[in-house]
Image (tube, grey):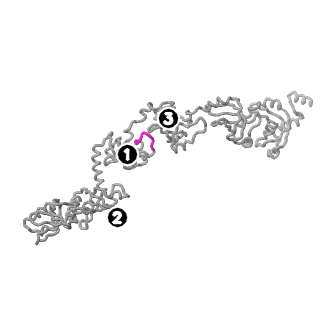
Amino acid sequence: MEDSNQISFEALFKKGNLSKIVGSIVTGTVIDIAKDYIYLDIGFKSVAVCEANEFYDPGSQTLSIQRGSTVEVLITGVDEVSGRAYASALQAKNYRAWQNVLRAYENGESVRGKVIMKVKGGLQVDIGIPAFLPQSQVDIVPIKNLDKFIGEEIECKITKINEGAGNIVLSRKAHLQAKKEELKLETLKLLQEGLIVEGTVKSLTDYGAFVDIGGVEGLLHLSDISWGRINHPSEKLEVGQKIVVVVLKYDAEKERINLGLKQLQADPWISVHEKYFVGSKVTGKAVEVTPDGGIILEVEEGIEAYVPASELSWTKKVPNVSRIVSEREKVDVVITAIDENINMLRASIRQLYPNPWEELQKKFQVGSRVKAPITSVTDFGIFVRLTDDIDGLVHVSDFSWTQKIQNPKQIYSMYKKGQEVEVMVLEIDPVLEKVSLGIKQLTPDPWPDIVARYPKGRKLKVKVKQVLDFGVIVQLEPELDGFIHVSELDLPKGEIIKNKYPEGAEIEAEVIKVDNSQRRIGLSEKALKRKEVEGVSSFSGSVTFLDILKQKLQKE
């Protein structure tokens, strides 16, 4: 269109018919500059006149042209009498701009323009003439903040033109997608496993990051980001970050790409023996509690140490591993093994310190007496504090030589937490990590004397101490009990034990059994009654078989 206008314009000049050049675009040379007008030589006998304000730079009073400058103008009118033509540089510019817009629209080409301002629903872009860029078409991904685009030069596709109304609608999104598709095709031609490329992190997920490596996105899995332990890609990457990755796997048919980042760095386990030795001390950050209650520490990126629960402490007072891990505390350990089968250091916390059980054996000999406070009272005994870390147990069976604990309440009534007691060290077992203590062992075993004092057949007056469903416990002495089984009680059929034998009641019974192994004395009320019926007198003392035989012979 431009060339045809120019040819017809020159022909008209030759014929001298100026009226028919109106609407044509010509190039003129500035020959004079007045206050309000610019005069141009357009190659004819007369000159063309333009308004000077079309040539002032925006925001200043400085002209953008000078004498000798060439400028393209549109002939808007002529004066046949004077032969003067009237022209407009702005209209020529708009005409050219529309020509470019229409050509780009018809050919599917992109246009470049500058973002002028935000308008309702999007942006106004100057592409030679004002055009509208909807917010939804600003980028491939949704954009909430449009302010950052103001003043920027951008490229867009033209999606709609209403020439009559002067409306133009743009899409930067379409331009970006077209460019991305072009780039993608070029990238796929070159793509192969092992290729090292630069990419941009586009998005992060729980399982990895998607990286644009040239119009096509590949997955950088969480496990391929770092040799070390990470819970989320955001610990190492952020959206928009430029990174260098290697193509680990490429499925051309499915266009599926797996990328690696850590593979561009040396595996730290290759040189593990150069840096770590059994017996050496290292520091690591707690990252996980294991099912057995141990801890996994990150010693460095890609090197972890496992501390089993058994290696946390020499005593049962283990640290709060959940808190240590949640707060990512730094922990000192000593390396006990380097396990290359699972790529893990094995370590110990307790081996940093002396073994308190060995120290305990040096401090307390078996048979030694100790006065110490009670730390806890249980149904099966009391725990006594021997050192800051170790408690010993006095089992219920080691409270008394003669009294048996039948009810845990007896323990709680006799002993209180914080109470100081004297005990004897019976056994120290470092392997099982336990100390056995005794109270009854502080005094000689009275049982041999008891056996002599309570021979079988001795008649006694005893007091009921405790009533059980299967008999009664009776008190022989302040520190000595005996037991009468229900079958040895003179209990009428159907009568309840506690009704006939209330606690504190006195009854007569005979010793029928002395159990040395169980340290029990069994008595019988019925045996005594049978002797009375048979006329055999019982007495306080020994009753022999010969005595009974003599009495029977006397009767006969």
Residue to which mark 3 is pinned? 282
Camera-nearest residue between 166 and 552: 166
| Spatial CA span between label 2 and label 1 | 38 Å
Give me the residue at 79% from left, 34% from top. Answer: 521
Q: Where 57 sits versus 467, above or below?
A: below
Badge 2 amino acid: Lys
Image quarter (top left, top right, bottom left or bottom right) of the C terminus: top right
How would you rate the neighbour count of disc 2 (Cα within 10 Å): few for under 14, some for 14-19, many for 20 or more?
A: few
x then y, percent, for residue 280: 50, 31
Marks 2 and 1 close (CB-CB < 8 Å) = no
| Spatial CA span between label 1 and label 3 | 35 Å
Q: Is residue 8 left or right of residue 197?
A: left
Badge 3 amino acid: Val
Q: Is residue 493 left or right of residue 108?
A: right
Residue to which mark 1 is pinned? 219
Residue 254 in view here: no
Image quarter (top left, top right, bottom left or bottom right) of the N terminus: bottom left
Under tag 1, what secondary structure? Answer: strand
> Residue 227 colored magenta?
yes
Residue bounds of the magenta highlight: 224-230
Q: Where 71 sits versus 504, above or below?
A: below
Under tag 3, what secondary structure? Answer: strand
x then y, percent, for residue 517: 74, 31
Q: Where 215 sits versus 89, above or below?
A: above
Image quadrant assignment for residue 150: bottom left
- The first of marks 3 and 2 along the sequence is 2
Camera-nearest residue between 48 and 292: 48
Residue 120's disc is 2
- The first of marks 1 and 3 along the sequence is 1
